[in-house]
Image: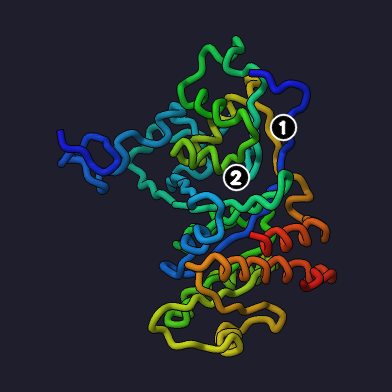
Amino acid sequence: MPTNGSGLPHHDWLDDDAGPVVRPYTVTGGRVRPVTGGFDLLAFVLAAPGATRAPEAAQLQPEHRAILALAREPISVAEIAAGLDLVVGVVRVLLGDLLASGLIALHEPSAMAHLPDDDILQAVVNGLRAL
Amino acid sequence: MDYGHSEPSIPLALKILVAGGFGVGKTTLVGSVSEVRPLHTEEVLTTAGIGTDDVLGIESKRTTTVAMDFGRITINDDLQVYLFGTPGQERFWFVWDELAFGALGAVVLADTRRLADCFPSVDYFERRRIPFVVGVNRFDGARRFTPDAVRQALDLDPNVPVVSCDVRDRQSGKHVLVALVEHVAAKRGHPVPTR
């Protein structure tokens, strides 16, 4: 079977007009809202120590586990979505499941991120100039 | 999985938006200054998805994918800057609203051959009082306009910086971002000292 550039099987009868073969929200069972949490694009997620071995992790889907793997270090919601190639809304639902199970810690942006003080602005200018 | 004694610290992440008309170079700018290749993420919207909790049973509704490209600049261990290219289609205002929430400011890219394309972006940030600078991207073959001519054509506030740039060039892209952060600081009444 011929393959396209991404190495996936190519089907003549499925072009871009047909839409995604797997609808994005199939992963969440059709749920479009997380059970808990707001999940700003720049909220940071950190997996709980031992999260993948926790009893709560037994029922996880592969996508949940992929998030836990990415979140061994603090990572933003936007980067999780990009890293897993899932739409942001789907990632939020999955993160809500993980948060409700206590498998991740969530750090929403602080007030300082929205209104940084002069020292931070100065650090940003210096950092940009040094790039 | 054991972290040992110390929990990893959560960086402070600042958000800068990159806006402007279609094909003006938003993703190019993000890519030229980002330390990682531009990351791509999407949001799927359905007309019925807004205000409902379930997408099952609405297969007949049209879905639209809104693409967002973003990049990252690490200033230090505790401080990161994220650059988000806004979706070009101005009808997705509520995606803009999410992106604009908590943003430090915005770069509006302008192409002097199609200056009107950036009107909606300028209008958006003016209305929400989000600090912005206008970056006039130099396109090959485009007539050069002075920043003042662009300022006049866009009817900008006198204090809004207008910076000429080449979005393909990292130094030039940096220059635009520095202009924005300095503008943000100046608006607060504490200008960043110049080098």
Q: Chain of mark 2?
A: A
Please give the label number shown on residue B140: none
Residue B77: quarter of image: top right
Q: Residue at x 64, y 38 (%)?
A: A38
Q: Chain of mark 1?
A: B
Which of these two is toward me, B98 or B60? B98
The location of residue B139, given as percent across then percent down, is: 43, 78
Which of these two is toward me, B2 or A31? B2
Left or right of residue A20: residue B131: right
The location of residue B49, given as percent across then percent down, is: 47, 42
- For disc 2, the neighbor class at 10 Å (few under 14, some 14 to 19, many from 20) is many
- For disc 1, the neighbor class at 10 Å (few under 14, some 14 to 19, many from 20) is few
- Residue B77 vs B121, above or below: the answer is above
The location of residue B12, given as percent across then percent down, is: 72, 46
Left or right of residue A120: residue B143: left
Left or right of residue A2: residue B88: right
